[in-house]
Image (cartoon, grey):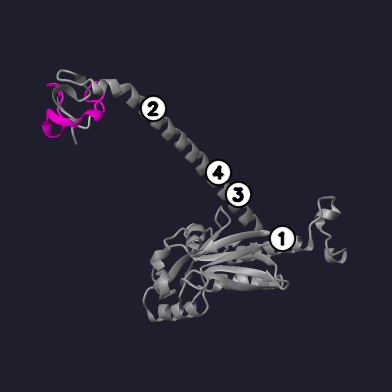
């Protein structure tokens, strides 16, 4: 009904809020359609250990199977759910980046959700959406075959998965070429029997916006930590330089009988000095006498800062 009012009219306009463009409204509506579809597809079931398949962070988890002589394979069901949700809003779902085989021709892609953009490559695909070591799945050219245990049904499923990848990031695009949302369907653990745990992440405008916000906060925190580390290092370097200047007369005047942080000087052979520790102090392997460079000695109480000639 709102479309009859005008191309850019929205609920916000009617109630006196800021105007929302037709594109923005379409993106918001498509997000809602996707979430409803996932809520239906991932409703609690017996395959869920906790009885809950929707996680607190808005992702979804479940087991999919390659099937056997009785049960049908279900590993392609999440993709079908996403494709149906995309079709419902007049869009087209395409594979943006496969999780099963490293594509050297397309090593990265840009996901779009309205005005939000997210640059994803093969490594960040696993880092962001799986939390699982991609190396286990045999990136290279092995495709999906290592995702399943060896059996007739698993081999059949692997061939089907290579032909129509069920895991990776998928982009829903409107008929006008507008990126409505994306979705990550990823393995989240090692397979067992015919089953594979997966995690599904709806990549909406809000998801990408929050991701960028958290990334910016992390980068700023790292920058501040680096600044603090640089300041501490500079402070330590300044202290070391000042200490070297203070100790210059002491080191220059070392002679037999002088007391140092490594004990009493008993011989001098520049640039080395032989020292002897007190009876109650022993160095490595019980040594008490050793040669040490003059420039390494200080006027501290032994054996503070002493390298024992090593």
Q: Is residue 204 visible?
A: no
Which badge, 2 or 3, is on the more N-terminal residue? Answer: 3
- Give SS at disc 3: helix
Residue 213 shows which numbered tag? 3
Residue 281 in magenta?
yes
Q: Is residue 8 left or right of residue 132?
A: right
Q: Who is closer to the viewer here, 39 or 180?
A: 180
Query: Dot 3: few (<14), some (14–19), or many (≥20) neighbours within 10 Å?
Result: few
Residue to which mark 4 is pinned = 220
Residue 9, above or below 298: below
Q: Which residues are magenta?
A: 276-305
**Secondary structure category for the residue under label 4:** helix
Front position in the image: 27 or 193 = 27
Numbered badge on residue 28: 1
Q: Earlier in the sequence, mark 1 or mark 4?
A: 1
Of the two numbered discs 4 and 2 on the same chain, state the one appearing first in sequence.
Answer: 4
Residue placed most toward the observer, 259 or 2: 259
Q: Which is in the foreground here, disc 3 or disc 1? A: 3
Q: Residue at x 60, y 73 (%)?
A: 94
């Amino acid at each position: 009904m709102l479309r009859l009012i005008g191309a850019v009219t929205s609920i916000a306009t009617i109630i006196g809020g800021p105007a929302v463009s037709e594109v923005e409204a379409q993106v918001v509506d498509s997000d809602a359609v996707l979430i409803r579809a996932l809520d239906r597809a991932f409703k609690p079931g017996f395959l869920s250990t906790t009885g809950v398949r929707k996680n607190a962070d808005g992702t979804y988890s479940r087991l999919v199977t390659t099937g056997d002589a009785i049960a049908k394979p279900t590993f392609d069901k999440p993709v079908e759910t996403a494709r149906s949700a995309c079709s419902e809003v007049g869009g087209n779902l395409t594979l943006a980046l496969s999780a099963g085989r490293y594509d050297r021709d397309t090593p990265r892609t840009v996901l779009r959700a309205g005005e939000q953009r997210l640059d994803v490559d093969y490594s960040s695909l696993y880092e962001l959406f799986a939390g699982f070591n991609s190396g286990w799945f045999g990136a290279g050219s092995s495709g999906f075959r290592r995702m399943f245990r060896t059996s007739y049904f698993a081999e059949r499923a692997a061939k089907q998965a290579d032909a129509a990848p069920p895991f990776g990031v998928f982009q829903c695009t409107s008929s006008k070429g507008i990126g409505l949302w994306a979705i990550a369907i990823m393995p989240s653990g090692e397979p067992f029997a015919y089953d594979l745990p997966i995690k599904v992440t709806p990549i909406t405008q809000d998801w990408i916006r929050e991701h960028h916000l958290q990334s910016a906060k992390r980068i700023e925190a790292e920058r501040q930590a680096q600044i603090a580390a640089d300041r501490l290092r500079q402070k330590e370097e300044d202290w070391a330089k000042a200490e070297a200047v203070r100790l210059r007369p002491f080191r220059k005047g070392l002679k037999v009988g002088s007391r140092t942080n490594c004990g009493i000087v008993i011989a001098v052979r520049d640039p080395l000095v032989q020292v002897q520790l007190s009876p109650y102090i022993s160095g490595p392997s019980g040594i008490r006498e050793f040669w040490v460079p003059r420039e390494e000695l200080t006027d501290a109480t032994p054996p503070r800062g002493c390298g024992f000639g090593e």
